[in-house]
Image (cartoon, grey):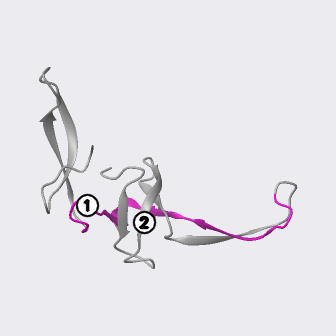
Amino acid sequence: MKVKKGDQVEVIAGKDKGKRGEILSVDRENERVIVEGANIIYRHMRPTQDMQQGGIIENEGPIHVSNVMLVCPSCDEMSRIGYRFISAGEEAKEEKVRYCKKCDEIIDN
């Protein structure tokens, strides 16, 4: 997957198209992500000892990873992501990093 927890993404398909948010969690097995403020689902909970009040609870639901697109931190636009190997120091050890294909800036720190 080209997105990670903590990345800023924009929803490009579905009922929440155009919303931006941070990725809260990633499910690699099912290729789904949970985006902050997108795909809100409602659960009707009955009162329990933990939750005395009960009621309707709002949570973010999972979205398929193909329906979100990473927002580049440097150009602040949606962009496709590529991978590149850069040398990490004197030991000539190469490190795999993500980069924005629009502005050609490295995304990972």
Q: Amino acid type of disc 1?
A: Cys
Q: Is residue 60 magenta?
A: yes
The residue sitting at 37% across, 75% down in the picture is 13
- Please tell me the numbered disc located at residue 72: 1
Q: SS class of the residue under badge 2?
A: strand
CB-based contact (under 8 Å), mark 1 and mark 2:
no
Residue 21: x and y in percent read 42, 66
Q: Give the residue number, with chain letter if any, for mark 2.
A: 21
Q: In which quadrant of the rendered view does residue 61 lie? A: bottom right
Q: Amino acid type of disc 2?
A: Gly
Question: Is disc 1 surrounded by few (<14), some (14 to 19) or many (20+) residues within 10 Å?
Answer: many
Query: Which residues fall within the magenta stretch?
Result: 51-77
The residue sitting at 41% across, 52% down in the picture is 6
Residue 87: x and y in percent read 13, 31
Q: SS class of the residue under badge 1?
A: loop
Q: In which quadrant of the rendered view does residue 75 lie? A: bottom left
Whether residue 32 sits left or right of residue 46 in the image: it is: left
Question: Is disc 2 surrounded by few (<14), some (14 to 19) or many (20+) residues within 10 Å?
Answer: some
The residue sitting at 42% across, 47% down in the picture is 28
- Please tell me the numbered disc located at residue 35: none
Residue 85: x and y in percent read 14, 38
Placement of the C terminus among the 4 image quadrants: top left
Q: CA distance from mark 1 to mark 2?
A: 13 Å
The residue sitting at 24% across, 68% down in the picture is 77
From the viewer's side, name the closer residue of 72 and 55: 72
Q: Is residue 7 above or below residue 78?
A: above
Q: Is residue 105 above or below residue 46?
A: above
Whether residue 38 sits left or right of residue 98 in the image: it is: right
Upstream in sequence: badge 1 or badge 2 = 2
- Which residue lies most toward the top here? 91
